[in-house]
Image (cartoon, grey):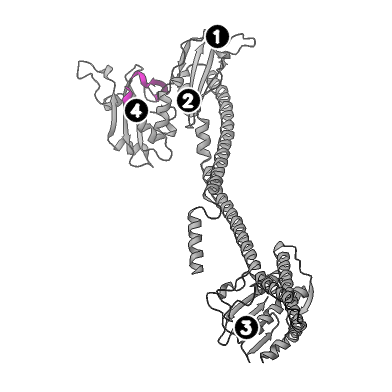
Amino acid sequence: MKKKQSADARKRRWRFGGYTGGKLRALIVCAFAVVYVLGMLLATWIDQTGRTREYGERVERMLTFVSGEIEKDNGSSMERILSRLADYYSYEENQMVSFAVYNADGILQTKNENVFYYEYREKENSERQAVDWKLEDYLAEEEIAQLAEYAVSVKDGGHPKYYIEAEKAGDGEDLAAIYVKRLFNSTDERKSAEDSEYEWSWVNPDLSTENEEESINDPADVQDGMIGPVGNVAVYFPGITQGLDVWREWNDSDYLQDFPMDYQDDPSTYHDPVIMEDFVTYRTSATPIYLNERPNYLEPEFSLVVRSVEHPWRAAVNSLNRIYLWGGILTAACVLLVLSIVEATFRKRARMEEQQRDFTNAIAHEMKTPLAVIRGFAENLEENANEEKRKYYLDQIIGQTEQMDGMVKEMVFLSRLDSGEYRPVKEPVSVRELIGELQSAYDTQIEEKRIEVRISCGEDFVISGDRRFLEKAFGNLIANAVDHNRYEGKISIDIEKNRCVIENTGEKISPEDLPRVCELFYTGDKSRGGQEKHLGVGLYLADRIFRAHRMKLKIANTEVGVQVTVEI
């Protein structure tokens, strides 16, 4: 019944927060959650700060490289260079860039666009020529978006899935047609493209005429008028390498698309302050472009301006995903560890408080009887001055005081053990000799109960420890074996190299009490003699002393009685 009540109490206690309490548990969890969030925010802020600096350095490298490419080309194909490099430098989804070139008067000369680059030959064996078509001048927004979807499959790495081609109209520079073919054999792209059907095509409606014979209705009609196969074709969609969403973000960004038509100040020295809005950084920077080498030039012919839209916070969050995960796991582990430690601490404190209450109650209970006896005999002495009874009364009073003195000494001894002050003195102690001395101390009780004692020793059990305390521990075991033995019973003591077994023919311990016989003050509802005979500290003392000497005390019932084993 007591065990069931204790288990029910533990369940109720755990349901309502254990020994720690629900509020303290919640406080610990919240504290760790705050530390985790602040730690992750700090890590993210440090990471995004580094990325912002890295993006700024990358912009400076862009300016140097792009201006160098324009100067090397002598400014003849600036639009293509800007579009190609805007596509190249927007390879990261967290930084998209746009380029523009201004002339010496600060007027917008050109900027990057969605461009179709095409190389062709006018006739067989002639040199290749190139033309750039700004797609916004020819295709509608929906058509550009459709072409971008095919361009994604070409730029997504590995073997392209589509083959994109364009045709020029006659001797002019206009874009006449675009067609897309699916590649069924990625190892032989040109052959598979020629053998496949058009999946998507566009024909320039402005080149159609009223004369059906002269109108262009099929890209193949234009292709027939060309000499030889097409050389190089490239479609520049900035950000398309990272997917359609990044390209759409680049295409829809007012900051990247709406360059001012003119600058009042010299654009080559223009630098916008770095602005962050909604965790997005906007950066503008510029550099001069010199097309002609002059030793003492004063002013540049053009100025290159770059605009950059950066997402350092998003990049930091994406890069720290595993840090967040492992940080959360580590935080959760720390929470569980701290909760378990705090719970164990509070449980230990609760047990100590409960033990202290039991200690107080037990002392009060044990002291009550001898005090009542002393009071009774003292009153009898006061009322009856008979010399014969006087001696009897005094002997009883002295005996009760000695019993109380012994209990006090045991309590002091227990206090020393529990306080951690006790450090056993290391000296070799022979268990065979110790048992022999203790047996002689109990000869009177053994003779009164006619108990037969048998001691066998194969190899002596020698313990390195404090003899005084070991004598106390083994003495309690011998005392229990004698006190709880039956009349004309037996005690068997077997000593081996690493253990000592003491068995008596006393009454067996009940299965309910057996696991708890070494607990402080525990005696069960009734001791084995039918009434409480001791304070319940003997076995507890013996167990504590043996554990201090790194030994184990085991108690079990046998067919004839109870067996106690002490072993290393």
Residue 457 lies, in percent from the top left, at: 71, 87
> What is the CA distance from the residue labelled 2 to the residue labelled 3?
97 Å
Q: How many marks?
A: 4
Residue 446 lies, in percent from the top left, at: 69, 88
What's the mark number on residue 145? Answer: 4
Q: Is residue 435 above or below residue 218?
A: below
User: Do residues under tags 4 and 1 come within 8 Å of each other at their CB atoms?
Assistant: no
Q: Is residue 161 above or below residue 332?
A: above
Q: Is residue 226 visible?
A: no
> What is the CA distance from the residue labelled 3 to the residue labelled 1?
109 Å
> What is the CA distance from the residue labelled 4 to the residue labelled 1?
37 Å
Helix, strand or loop at mark 1? loop
User: Do residues under tags 2 and 3 come within 8 Å of each other at their CB atoms?
Assistant: no
Residue bearing the label numbered 2: 86
- In the rendered structure, the answer to whether residue 446 lies left or right of residue 267 reads right
Residue in front for this viewpoint, 33 or 409: 409
Residue 361 figure quarter? bottom right
Segment colored magenta: 118-142
What's the mark number on residue 484? Answer: 3
Helix, strand or loop at mark 4? helix
Residue in front for this viewpoint, 552 or 240: 552
Q: Residues within 10 Å of mark 1 (few under 14, many from 20)?
A: few
Q: Residue at x 62, y 63 (%)?
A: 355
User: Do residues under tags 1 and 2 come within 8 Å of each other at their CB atoms?
Assistant: no
In front of the other: label 4 or label 3? 3
